[in-house]
Amino acid sequence: MTSPKVCRPYRAKTKGKVEPFNHYLKNSFIVPLTASFRQAGLTLDATAANSRIGDWLSTIANVRKHGTTGVSPEERMLQERLALLPLPKVMQAFPLPIHQTRPIPIESLQHPLSVYQSILEMPI
């Protein structure tokens, strides 16, 4: 087994395929949405982004023709789903939906900073 190595930023060939997707997400979703919010005098936050991501996925991201595979991610998932192995029994106790049109917002597990500050200020 090899040990992990530090890689230079923006080097997709050494870091895997995460950074190209982050770039795509930022330039295709975040930047245009931020611009439209600014025009309306609003600030984009996680709640607003989560409320819009479902439409973006179904109308833009999942239907575009992928540059490497030549098919849309939606079509590719249908093909790959046939080759997926069953979930381990532990995971079967928590069934996951097969297809959702909208993401389910996940609440942050991090408390507001004021909570941590109040803990620091507690007498010992």
Image (tube, rainbow, N blue to C red):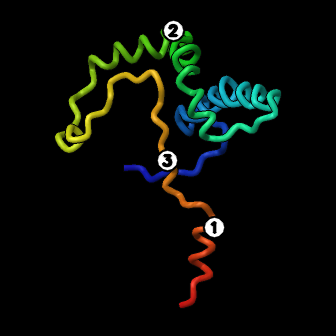
Amino acid marked by disc 2: Gly
Q: CA distance from mark 3 to mark 1?
A: 17 Å
Find residue 114 and name its label: 1
Q: Is residue 13 visible?
A: no
Q: Residue furthest left?
A: 89
Relative depth, front residue between 37 and 63: 37
Between disc 2 and disc 1, whose residue precedes?
Answer: 2
Residue shown at 56%/13% (left/top)?
Answer: 59
Specify whether 51 is left or right of 105. right
Mark 3 surroundings: few (<14), some (14-19) or many (≥20) residues within 10 A: few
Which residue bears the numbered disc 3?
A: 107
* Of marks 2 and 1, the one in the foreground: 1
Nearer-N-terminus badge (3/1): 3
Task: Give x and y (percent) for residue 20.
Answer: 61, 29
Give me the C-alpha separation between circle 2 and circle 3.
36 Å
Residue 70 is labelled as 2
CA separation in Å, label 2 and label 1: 49 Å
Q: Secondary structure at mark 3?
A: loop
Q: Quadrant of residue 40?
A: top right
Is 11 placed left or right of 98 in the picture? right
Dot 2 or dot 3: first in sequence order is 2
Q: Determine the residue positioned at 42% across, 11% down.
A: 75
* Mark 1 neighbour class, 10 Å CA radius: few under 14, some 14 to 19, many 20 or more: few
Residue 66 position (above or below residue 27)? above
Q: Quadrant of residue 90?
A: top left
